[in-house]
Image: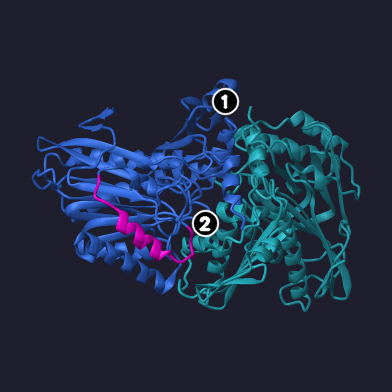
Chain colours: A cyan, B blue
Amino acid sequence: MKETGNFKEKKFSWPTGFYSDGVNCDLRKGRPDLGWIFSKTPAQAAGVYTTNKFCAAPTKSTKQLVSDKHLLQCVLMNSVIANSFTGHKGLLDVQSEQEAVSEKLGIPSSLVGVASTGLIGAPLPLKKILTGIDQLKLTKNTTATRAIMTTDLQPKLCCVTVNIAGKSCTITGFAKGSGMIHPKMATMLAFITTDVAIEAATLQALLTELTSSTFNQITVDGDTSTNDMVLTLANGASETALLTSKSPDFNNFKKAYHHVLKSLAQQIAADGEGATKLVEANVNAAKNKAEAQKAAKAIVGSNLVKAAFFGADPNWGRIISTLGATPVAFDPENIDLSLNNHLLVQHSEPLVFNREEVSKSLQSKKVIIDLNLHAGDAAGQAWGCDLTYDYVKINASYSS
Amino acid sequence: MKETGNFKEKKFSWPTGFYSDGVNCDLRKGRPDLGWIFSKTPAQAAGVYTTNKFCAAPTKSTKQLVSDKHLLQCVLMNSVIANSFTGHKGLLDVQSEQEAVSEKLGIPSSLVGVASTGLIGAPLPLKKILTGIDQLKLTKNTTATRAIMTTDLQPKLCCVTVNIAGKSCTITGFAKGSGMIHPKMATMLAFITTDVAIEAATLQALLTELTSSTFNQITVDGDTSTNDMVLTLANGASETALLTSKSPDFNNFKKAYHHVLKSLAQQIAADGEGATKLVEANVNAAKNKAEAQKAAKAIVGSNLVKAAFFGADPNWGRIISTLGATPVAFDPENIDLSLNNHLLVQHSEPLVFNREEVSKSLQSKKVIIDLNLHAGDAAGQAWGCDLTYDYVKINASYSS
């Protein structure tokens, strides 16, 4: 159990008033492929969505619902088939899913969000999905967190408790990656549930702000899939007073929420396809935060940097070259660079260092790049993973 | 011998009045690593250079010379060590190289360009280079075209003859890649020599224009190295009348020159690190040329697209997803997509196709993607290669 400030990580469990379940409805063999989350009352809802022009039907539909009413009571989710690039039929299929859930749970279909991930361009096997909905129950199990997995090796989970107005509240998040666009698959989904009482507008502002420094700062190939979506549902079941940006505990909630988003983002990067390690870039002393984040993301997105770390190669020239190709402001004669706390470049002067020692440190499960641009006082972070044989294998071996 | 319009490809040879040589000066074992090209008279010179903020010393210095005087008589070139990120000492080393060449050939040092490719951050082994300069001769051999190779599997060569005012003139180009930034190496160099009589300003305008649709449209990882440079030297030794943009043969020259640049660019992409095939994206009916080129380059730059082609997988969903993530204008409900002339998507409707047949066609040495955006009448092309196990191996195996 890790303690940071006023919140605590704890074993995964659903917040008060949230239920979930997952089943196999035969979209694939032997693993759950359909799940849901449900709140006993309509929950305040916030979301961020893909900017890809080919926005998938379920993403488009859920975005519309959340934007219109700012409320959701259930989210249905499936893997294997993305219901993306499926035209008008795709939207009708989403409607059928919403109506089936609505009927089964006795809630308006306008409170049912849908999220899909999987093959682009294939129609949704609606009959199987409807049979699956029939089997879903209102339990407290965690099967849904595995039902959305594609090439993910493990579910991405984060659960914290945070004290709000003297009461212990819960924020529970889960996500799928796997660190990048999956072969034929589409792609990153994350769901956060909390029993904190907070209005959708406040939640949306927080989610938008925090996504820019968490989910938007992970990359494996810089692609933005057709189905990307992060949803947060807050049902207020903790029965605390309404949390607003003026509440004394607002910052506690923000920190805890940020922790959950960042943890899920890092877990997605670390479990990138074929990845053997998490790569973190910290860009400090940049002119502004946007530039710091841009530089950090460019570095963890470079194939050359990623391949070097697979080989535990302290090849800082590639980091320099990637940095120099960004439009970020700095003086090329004055940057510092460290790898896993070994200072390799100071004021743009290459330092003599023990290659064997640094290479050994790069064999660990996490590589940390620290850059100082001496150009301001803003900082930014980004996370990625190494580029490995298995990455190529996974992505080339789906030959039809 | 391929004939296209008014020019003809022919076996590699130097244009009238150009000489060259290459030697091994012990920067590496057993292969030439230092070379030069020389014109019997000062040649009109044009260049395009890296936009990387960490511009290497030789690139910076040569850019300055060409911008100031628009003349070069000799270009010295080496591989293995890039003389990049080497501070003031790097510039002094370039000066020493220029002076040594100047003294040996009896020409002003301000007519000596220098180009380096190789390890970033290491000092130039000046003594070895100076010994090498001492050994270089004014021959007609092609050793220089191999002296600049790093992980390139073969030299990139293109030589054409073109009729200008009734005389047969020659345009000879060579380049190194290898399709991307080399591990620790930096990077793309290309040199074009011609005996056509043309002024530097005209040549520079042409080179700048044509680079945008040739060298700037190849990618393997989207990186821009610290040493990238394309130089063209025109010495007028064919004794034709001065070619201007008003000359009747100007377009013949332009077409022939464009052919050489495009051929070298494609050869660099096809010989990308670990590559087994060339991938060409043709984006048609775009709003404007810049958008067509941007979309084409995004597609050949996608790791997922590249890995799919390694696996001969007709996985068009990845192309769609990459296209959708670009800022390019089009109607998501109306695009067409073909792979190797097999139409797979029409008006955004996935078509039924013979997977086996298309997959078989993707096993060839060249894959062609055709996209129709139905958004205008502009077209753009880009070239890349597939992403393979060998790519990862080459780039991860330089562990110190």
Residue behind mark 2: B184
Q: Is residue A46 visible?
A: no
Find residue B6 and report its horizontal and vertical position in percent. 20, 32
Q: Is residue B81 above or below residue B289?
A: below
Give the residue type at disc 2: Lys
Q: Secondary structure at mark 2?
A: loop
Give the residue type at disc 1: Ser
What stretch of residues is rendered in magenta? B119-139
- Chain of the residue displaying label 1: B
Residues marked 2 and 1, same chain = yes
Find residue B5 and report its horizontal and vertical position in percent. 23, 30
Labels 2 and 1: the sequence-earlier one? 2
Measure the C-alpha gap from mark 2 to mark 1: 35 Å
Residue behind mark 1: B359
- Of marks 2 and 1, the one in the foreground: 2
**Left or right of B84: which side holds B344?**
right
Q: Is residue B356 above or below residue A228?
A: above
- Chain of the residue displaying label 2: B
